[in-house]
Amino acid sequence: MRSILTVYRKELADYFSSKKFIILLALVYVAALSSVYVSLQNIREVAKATEEHVFLRLFTTSGDILPSFITFISFFIPIIGIIFGFDAINSERASGNLSRLLSQPIYRDSVINGKFLAGVTTLSIIVSSIVFIIAGIGLRTIGVPPTSEEILRIFMFIFISICYGTFWMGLSILFSIIMEKTTASILVSIAIWLFLMFFLPIIANAIANAMAPLEGATLSTQLKNYSIEHGILRISPSTLYSESIVTLLVPTGGHFLLRPVLTSDVEKMLLKPLSLGQSLIQIWPQLIVIIALAIICFAVSYIIFIKQEIRST
């Protein structure tokens, strides 16, 4: 345990003193504060339509030019996770630091566990700090305090975001262990993220339209088309994360399969704000899958690293 803490403290010090951390933190803060500035400009108009969950609209209201905060955070969290993990092992191996470190009374599992925990801690600090800053700015500006339910929703949002970032960090650590070059590990990680984020929706839409064409389609065909497309999209952790945070922060956004085919009258009856319990019931499958993927990535990384040959230089 002591050796894990030693590696953990050393990695934390490296993270907080590195230029890439400072630059990344600055970019995230600028993007997030820009989005909250836009939301504050539009939140009064949006809030006139409803008096429920006004505080949550800080995170979900978008403008004509800039998207909402949850759109920004969905984009940046995978990048943060990848950057924290892509050179965790192979850079240490290439510089010879890994063999020198393991020559000390430090076990292999302490090295990877300490690096992983330090990355999760740093990711948690980044996500939590920007959410709390935005909440503080919103509280002072709009003067509407959050309800207890809104506070719980925000904390759940932070937890899910950390789990999502942990998955991408675990995946990039896995490639860092498998591949000798840091450039190769980051390129593969980013390629997977780009495919899941941008290319999978195109493929899913094409498959759905081929299996259930929308031209002159009946209501059941439209629902089948959407079900096929969304079933394919749920292969991607990005889709699971988006579904989770939308259901939490936009309580009327949880009826995924019904929304495309609802008439306006039926929509008014069904798309009522979900309670926190109902939201959690809807998102627990997505949350379980995200956590499971993060655990699987780290477990595979752990097993490969323990069995990997590390030669002294």
Image: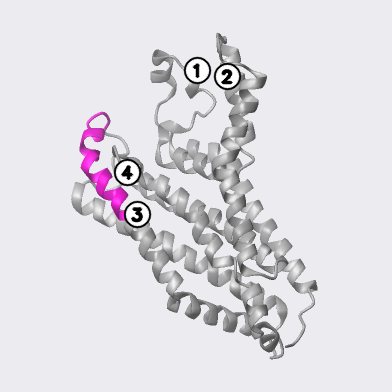
Q: Residue at image x 59%, y 44%?
A: 196
Q: Could you give the CA–CA distance between mark 1 and mark 2, rounded to whole angstroms?
A: 7 Å
- Do the residues under discs 1 and 2 have CB atoms within 8 angstroms? yes
Q: Amino acid at mark 4?
A: Leu
Q: Amino acid at mark 1?
A: Val
- Do the residues under discs 1 and 4 have CB atoms within 8 angstroms? no
Residue placed under numbered mark 4 in the picture: 66
The answer to whether residue 242 of the structure is visible from this angle is: yes
**Segment tinted magenta in the rendering:** 31-50
| Relative to 168, 19 lies left or right | left
Q: Main secondary structure of the magenta part?
A: helix
Seen in the picture, residue 198 relative to 105 is either above or below; the reply is above
Residue placed under numbered mark 3 in the picture: 31
First-in-chain label (1 vs 3)? 3
Q: How is the image coloured?
A: one colour
Mark 1 vs mark 4, foreground winner is 4
Q: Residue at image x 59%, y 81%?
A: 7
Q: Amino acid at mark 3?
A: Ala
In percent of width and height, residue 296 lies at: 70, 56
Residue placed under numbered mark 2 in the picture: 223
- Do the residues under discs 4 and 3 have CB atoms within 8 angstroms? no
In percent of width and height, residue 28 lies at: 38, 59
Q: Secondary structure at mark 2?
A: helix
First-in-chain label (2 vs 4)? 4
First-in-chain label (2 vs 3)? 3
User: In the drawing, what numbered circle is on residue 272?
Assistant: none
- Do the residues under discs 1 and 3 have CB atoms within 8 angstroms? no
The answer to whether residue 237 of the structure is visible from this angle is: no
Q: Neighbour class for label 2 at 10 Å: few (<14), some, many (≥20)?
A: some
